[in-house]
Image (cartoon, grey):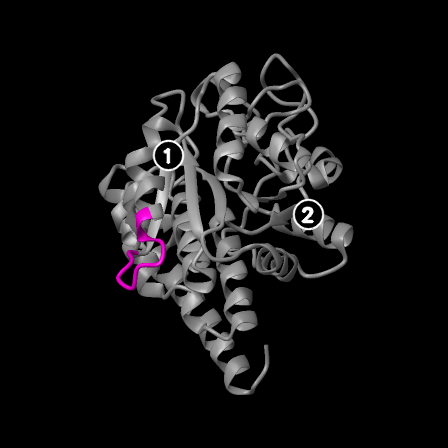
Amino acid sequence: TLDISVRGAIKVLYDAARSKYGKPLTYLAASALRERVGPQKYVIIGTGLPVRGWISPAISETDGPTGAATLARALYLGFKAWPMILCEELILPVVKAAVRGAGMMILTPEELEKSKGSLLGVPGVVVQSFPYDEEKAKVEAVRILDKFNPVAVVSIERVGRNVNGIWHNMKGLDVSKAVAKFDYLFEDAKNRGIFTMGIGDGGNELGMGGIKEAIRKNIPYGAECQCPCKGGLAAEFEPDLTMAATVSGWGSWGIEAVLAALLGKVEVLHSGELEIRSLLAANSEGCIDGITGFVEPLEDSVPGHVCAGMIETLRFMVNKVLSAGGH
């Protein structure tokens, strides 16, 4: 939660969420996953943001896909879970590359089933697209939840619709046409009693509805956007847990670190080397940094080597906790 990128939003977002839930957000997230996730249980992770959608809906940013990839890896290593990452169809190549960069294979649900009980299984992640069209999204949400019965649904750096049903970027501009309509999946999941969590860094992300009043009051364009709807960029849907991070993908690092400590397995938290591998793999498919626009290993303008150093610091802390006998 250090405001290392000097955006000024994290203190508002984190303080509001911390006050709402009363405990550290990464601990709450990791604990909720630990209570629910187990072998061959699906966890759905939504990610991918067409950060320059007005130019092309295929232009996505590094923040999100890499965090989803490493969280999927952590869920496999920690629980032998079956992660499923959903994104826009045009962003599939980026997300698949990020997953492979994090050391995981892309498998179909049928291939995961074949790996069940095998001594030589493959660490796999399902990566699929989700519809742009709202009516198709409603149907697909029901199909996915019925078929895979996930124990948790997580959003990392995905825009969410506002009170008027419009999806906005951080400038308060309408980006609805460029984004898949994940909100219906999350709403249906919550109605079924499935744990839902959103990770964001600006207030317009899916799942930030738990602190929407703070967003409307304190974040630029939070209450009144620049598009004709004038409803503000604040995302409306309130999940079971709203989690704020300086960079959304970094929130996954915190969850991984706490899971690593709780499970007594430092390897659940990925290494700095894997972070850079995942970033470079996403870059190889044209993924850009959301702030600078360059196809470089950056996350919201923070260089990959700085990100890697932060992860290695977390790993050092987890190792210290475990060597002292703590969980």
Q: Nearer the viewer, residue 323 or 17?
A: 323
Quadrant of the rendered image containing residue 186: top right
Q: Earlier in the sequence, mark 2 or mark 1?
A: 2
Q: Secondary structure at mark 2?
A: helix
Residue at 35% over, 64% down:
272
Residue at 42% over, 43% down:
84
Q: Secondary structure at mark 1?
A: strand
Q: For mark 1, what is the residue?
A: 128
Which stretch is magenta? 114-122
The three-letter code of the residue at mark 2 reads Val
Q: Nearer the viewer, residue 81 or 249?
A: 81
Q: Is residue 117 magenta?
A: yes
In this rendering, does residue 288 appear at all?
Answer: no
Q: Which quarter of the image is occupied by the N terminus? A: bottom right
Residue 290 in percent (x, y) is at 41, 39
Q: Is residue 169 above or below residue 29?
A: above
Q: Which quarter of the image is occupied by the C terminus? A: bottom right
In this rendering, does residue 298 appear at all?
Answer: yes
Q: Is residue 31 above or below residue 5?
A: below
Residue at 48% over, 17% down:
136
Residue 285 in percent (x, y) is at 24, 38
Q: For mark 2, what is the residue?
A: 12
Residue 89 in percent (x, y) is at 35, 27
